[in-house]
Image (tube, rainbow, N blue to C red):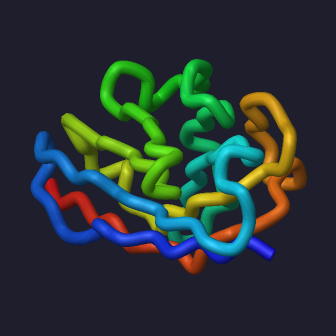
Amino acid sequence: QVQLVESGGGLVQAGGSLRLSCAASGRTFSDYAMGWFRQAPGKAREFVAAISWSGEGTYYEDSVKGRFTISRDNAKNTVYLQMNNLKPEDTAVYYCAAAHFRSLPSRGYEYDYWGQGTQVTVSS
């Protein structure tokens, strides 16, 4: 089992920044690719970004490229999502997820463990 706990969400004005963190426990963190997803009210969950187990590979959904950066610190068992130039359409609950021995997964079914989510609200 892997436990994932997100933090760092909040209310921010359009154009502002937030950094989300996801702390993992329970298994060898570096065995897992990590990803961020989000779900806005009334919408399906969507992929945001993924990072390989080593941190050398990253993959982003088109709408966040150039604004969001995913990173990880395997020594701290933590993955981050730096979000800059936030837009109202980024408003959602953000979830981190862990995928065992996969390479940059972008589909929800590829992930084995999920956190509870953290709310991000961007005001216009």
Q: What is the residue that sits farthest to the front in this orientation? A: 75
Residue occupying image coordinates x 27% and y 52%: 19
In the rendered view, does 88 fall on the left or right side of 13? right
Residue occupying image coordinates x 33% and y 65%: 120
- Quarter residue 111 falls in: bottom right
Please tell me whether residue 54 is drawn above or below residue 89 in the rendered image.
Answer: above
The C terminus, quarter of image: bottom left
In the rendered view, does 21 fall on the left or right side of 14? right
**Total number of numbered labels?**
0
In the rendered view, does 119 fall on the left or right side of 108? left
Please tell me whether residue 86 is drawn above or below residue 94 in the rendered image.
Answer: above
> 103 or 39: nearer the eye?
103
How far across and down, in percent of the image, does residue 60 sit? 55, 28
Residue occupying image coordinates x 67% and y 45%: 30
> 86 or 105: nearer the eye?
105
How far across and down, in percent of the image, does residue 74 sit? 52, 46
The N terminus, quarter of image: bottom right
How far across and down, in percent of the image, does residue 11 sit? 19, 69
Residue occupying image coordinates x 78% and y 36%: 105
In the rendered view, does 93 fall on the left or right side of 57? left
Please tell me whether residue 41 is drawn above or below residue 89 in the rendered image.
Answer: below
How far across and down, in percent of the image, does residue 95 sit? 56, 64
- Quarter residue 8 falls in: bottom left
